[in-house]
Image: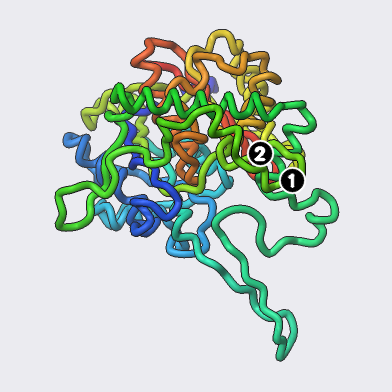
Amino acid sequence: MRRSVAIMPEAFLCDAVRTPIGRYGGALSTVRADDLAAIPIKALTERSTRADWEQLDDVFLGCANQAGEDNRNLARMAVLLAGLPERIPGATVNRLCGSGMEAVGQAARAIKCGEAELLIAGGAESMSRAPFVIGKAETAFSRNQRFHDTTLGWRFVNPLIEREYGIDSMPQTAENVAAEYRITREDQDAFAYRSHLRAANAQAEHRFDEEIVPPREPGKNAPLLAHDEQVRAATTPQALAKLPTPFRDGGTITAGNSSGINDGACAVLLASEGAAGKHGLTPKARIVAMTSIGVAPRIMGIGPAPATEKLIARVGITLDEIGVIELNEAFASQSLAVLRLLGLPDNAPRVNADGGAIALGHPLGMSGARLVAHATYRLHREKQRYALCTMCIGVGQGIALLLERV
C-alpha cells in the first residue's frame, strides 16, 4: 500500500507586542510578574478582534527565576489574568536567558508538527521583585541558615558543579571572555556607547512605538511607563570610561558596558497558514528554525557564535544572506567576541540597529521574545528577507532562531 506524504505546516508570526522595559526598582517594580506577563497577552487579544480566542491551543511563556510571585506556572496565571477563556492552558519554560526565545521556538514546533494551530508565546521577568530565599536546615536543630538573592546568578550550588565547572558569576564570565578573546575596555565602552546612541535614536524616531503597549495602573489614564526606561541618551564615551571595574582587579567589565537588571514582558501570536486565514490574521514572518548548543560555563557569553553556525548550517544559508541580526547584549565583551568569531565588524549596521540590551535592558525571561518581536518589525521596515535572533545563556549555552519575512 502506498503511503501518503504529509506536508509539514509552517508556523507564522502574526503579531508581537511588549511592555516597555523598566529599570531595577523603577516604574514597573510595583507590578507583579504574573500581572506583567498578562499585559502583552491581553494587548494581542485586543489587537486581533476577529480571532476566536476559544480556539487558542496553548500559551508558552519563558521565565528564568520563578522563585517568588512568578512561581506556580507564570503562563497559566497570565492566561487567567489576561481574561482568556479558562479552557486555555499555559506552560512556563526555562532556558534561563533564552527562555523567551525557547517559548517561541516550542510554540512554532507545535504548529509545524500539527499538534496546534494558534498559540501565544513570549516571556516575562520582574527582576526588581525577585525575592530572597532561605534553604531548609540540613540537620536536626540546625542553627545555620543560608539566604540567597534570586535576582541573578547561582544559588543552592551543587558542589560537583562547582568543582568541575566553577560557579563564575555572570560578570566574571564576561571578564573571562574579555581576557580569553582579548577584548579591550576601550572597545567594550565604544560598543556600549553605540548601543545607547542607536537606542536613543530609535526612540526619537518612534521605531519602537508599534511594538510597545504602555502598562497602566488600574483606574488611571496615565501609563506607568511609556518607553524603555534604561536608555541613556546623554551618556558619553568619557563618562563610560570613568566607571569602576568591580568584578575583577584590573578587569574591564563595568555597569556601563553590561546589560541591566530589568523588568518587562513580551508576547507574540503564532499561527498556521490555515489558522491565520480563519482568524483574520496577517502573517508577518515565518519561523524557519531554532537551534541551541552548549559551551563552557565559564565563557558562556560566546554561545551565540556556535549556535548561529549550527543554525545556518542546518538551514543551508550563509550569514551574508541575513539582513537583520538581533544579538542580545548581555555584556559588551561577549557581544564583541561573538561578532568577531562570526567574522562581523564591531559596528555592523545590521546588528542591533536600534540598540540592544546594554541600552534597553535585559529582563531575563522576556529578552528572547523581544529579540524575535523587534526583528520582525525590522524585517518589514528595512525590507530584508531573513532575520537572525541569538543570545548567550547562563551555565553555558547559546540559542539562535531564524525568521523569514512574509
368 sits left or right of 119 in the view: right
Q: Earlier in the sequence, mark 2 or mark 1?
A: 1
Residue 47 lies, with reference to residue 387, above or below; the image says below
Q: Is residue 148 left or right of residue 181?
A: left
- Which residue of the protein is positioned furthest toward the bottom in this rendering? 141
The residue to which callout 1 is attached is 248
Looking at the picture, tell me which residue is in the foreground, 151 or 277. 151
Residue assigned mark 2 = 253
2 and 1 marks in contact (CB < 8 Å):
yes
Q: Is residue 348 above or below residue 256?
A: above
* Circle 1 SS class: loop
In whole angstroms, how far apart are the C-alphas of marks 2 and 1? Answer: 8 Å
Q: Position of residue 163 (x, y in %)?
A: 85, 55
> In this rendering, is residue 156 above or below 275?
below
Q: Amino acid at mark 2?
A: Ile
Most foreground residue, 10 or 222: 222
Q: Residue at x 56, y 33 (%)?
A: 240
Numbered-mark total: 2
For disc 1, the neighbor class at 10 Å (few under 14, some 14 to 19, many from 20) is few
Residues packed near mark 2 inside 10 Å, few (<14), some (14 to 19) or many (20 plus): many
Residue 404 x/y as whole percent = 44, 17
Q: Which part of the image, by quadrant, shows the C terminus? A: top left
Q: Residue at x 26, y 42 (%)?
A: 214
Task: Give 152 or 401, whichever is nearer the viewer.
Answer: 152
Q: Residue at x 49, y 37 (%)?
A: 368
Q: Quadrant of residue 366?
A: top left
Look at the image and tell me whether residue 322 can be seen: yes
Q: Position of residue 299 (x, y in %)?
A: 74, 38
Q: Residue 149's quadrant in the figure?
A: bottom right
Instruction: Indicate left or right for 177 with 113 as reference.
Output: right
Label 2 SS: loop
Residue 157, position as x, y percentages in the image: 72, 61
